[in-house]
Image (cartoon, rainbow, N blue to C red):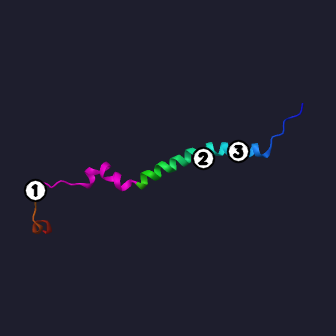
Amino acid sequence: MSKPQISFYNLAWRWHFYAGLFVAPFMILLAITGIIYLFKPQLDPLLYRPLMVVEAGHHRHSADSLLA
């Protein structure tokens, strides 16, 4: 029996499929991190509110006492 001939077209599509399976998770990761980076200004107040907002304290000092 002779081996069936594998055409270049079928071989190229098979390699293209495997390359897509290998690259797709990396591209999805890049897309997700890009979206997070794009919306970072909107997410910062939600995630870091205690660090960005400081409530006024009870003890106040005058500027002269702070300078001294």
Instruction: Estimate the x, y position of residue 37 in percent, counting from the top left.
Output: 43, 54
Q: Say if mark 3 contacts mark 1, CB within 8 Å.
A: no
Instruction: Estimate the x, y position of residue 53 in percent, counting from the top left.
Output: 23, 54
Residue at left offset 84%, top offset 39%: 5
Instruction: Estimate the x, y position of residue 44 in percent, counting from the top left.
Output: 33, 53
CA separation in Å, label 3 and label 2: 12 Å
The answer to which image quadrant residue 57 occupies is: bottom left
Residue type for callout 1: His
CA separation in Å, label 3 and label 1: 71 Å
Residue at left offset 55%, top offset 49%: 27
Residue type for callout 3: Trp
Q: Which residues are magenta?
A: 39-59
- The residue under label 3 is 15
Quadrant in which the C terminus appears: bottom left
Q: Secondary structure at mark 3?
A: helix
Quadrant in which the N terminus appears: top right
- Residue situated in front as seen by the camera: 3 or 10: 10
Task: Tell me the number on the disc at residue 59.
Answer: 1
Instruction: Estimate the x, y position of residue 39 in percent, counting from the top left.
Output: 39, 53
Task: Tell me the number on the disc at residue 18.
Answer: none
Asked if the magenta segment contains residue 49, the reply would be yes
